[in-house]
Amino acid sequence: MLELTNPIYLDANKAREHLESIQWPDGPGCPHCGNCDKARITKLEGKSTRPGVYKCKECRKPFTVTVGTVFERSKIPLNKWVLASHLMAASKKGISAHQLHRMLGITYKSAWFMAHRIREAMRDDKPSGPMGGEGKFVEADETYIGGKETNKHRSKRNSKNIGGMGKEIVFSLVEREGRVRSHHVPSVTAKTLRPILVAQLDAKTFLMTDDAGQYRHMKRDFAHETVNHGAGEYVRGDAHTNTVEGYFSVLKRGINGTFHHVSQQHLKRYLAESDFRYNEREALGVNDTMRAQAILEDIRGKRLTYRRTDGPHYGQAA
């Protein structure tokens, strides 16, 4: 439950102490050189020094708990970062940048970029091995993200864009009673999807899909069952794709109802956000507070800047 009177949401120093307890459970460590020797790290407490600054005696560089994280060099108070992280963790279908802008009292531009930084923290950059395994079921399916042609202005409609044409493709793997991994893919072909399946799934997994052509050769890699949606078949024993379609329903309600528009460039981050909340859901024993803490644990090593670190190009993620 979100307690808005909690000091970590109201006071920047309390938020910093909360973040330090999560990032440095055994005491501060230097993000520049990796030194964790407490005797070689000094807390600076001069009158001209802001709270929370330490100095490493090994590399002689100052640092705070935000150095090397998605919060680095932000002028937004840390208590607002912590509150935004909790709001995004607790919102089943996401929270828009406009809503963050209104609730946190910051500009829309800052709220938009803040949300993308938090999505970077949600991104699973260290997958814990292949999905599935002996006796386990993984469902695979694809969905299309994009508006209907009839909803566009007459001058922007393309009569050739029928079905999934002109839309972005999302391919997801969902382990029953387990986790999801989503991918933004360029096309729905065996050549595109098979390498993902082979790389992401244990060879002993029971793979469940519909009977689309791109899956028809999967029997050589997995124990593979299909359901024929075209013939009105949706469940046959253990064979169904209802779990992954349920995941898509929540993903699309977030995109259609909360964000309204997602660019091709940033779709991967919205997928990371949706995957994170699914993988850290209540059915797996994770509540909102635990989910928010998981975000704050994973902020390190995921810088995201307005400028690229290798050149003066605005609007690109580092």
Image (cartoon, rainbow, N blue to C red):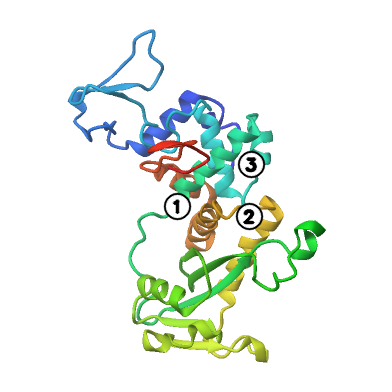
Residue 314 image point, x, y percent: 51, 37
Q: Which residue is mark 2?
A: 93
Give the Cα distance between marks 1 and 3. Answer: 18 Å
Pick whichever, 106 or 132, lies toward us: 106
Residue 4 image point, x, y percent: 61, 35
Is residue 134 left or right of 207 when viewed as pictured? left
Q: Residue at x 46, y 47 (%)?
A: 120
**Marks 3 and 2 in Cβ contact (< 8 Å):** no
Q: Which residue is mark 1?
A: 123
Pick whichever, 94 or 231, lies toward us: 231
Q: Which quadrant is home to the C terminus? A: top left
Give the Cα distance between marks 3 and 2. Answer: 13 Å
Q: Residue at x 77, y 58 (%)?
A: 152
Three-letter code for the amino acid on which mark 1 is drawn: Arg
Q: Which mark is residue 97?
A: 3
Q: Is residue 1 visible?
A: no
Q: On the image, which quarter does residue 99 sit in?
A: top right
Three-letter code for the amino acid on which mark 3 is drawn: Ala
Q: Is residue 256 visible?
A: yes
User: Are there few (<14), some (14-19), or many (20+) residues within 10 Å of tag 1?
Assistant: many
In the picture as drawn, the residue positioned furthest to the right comes out as 154
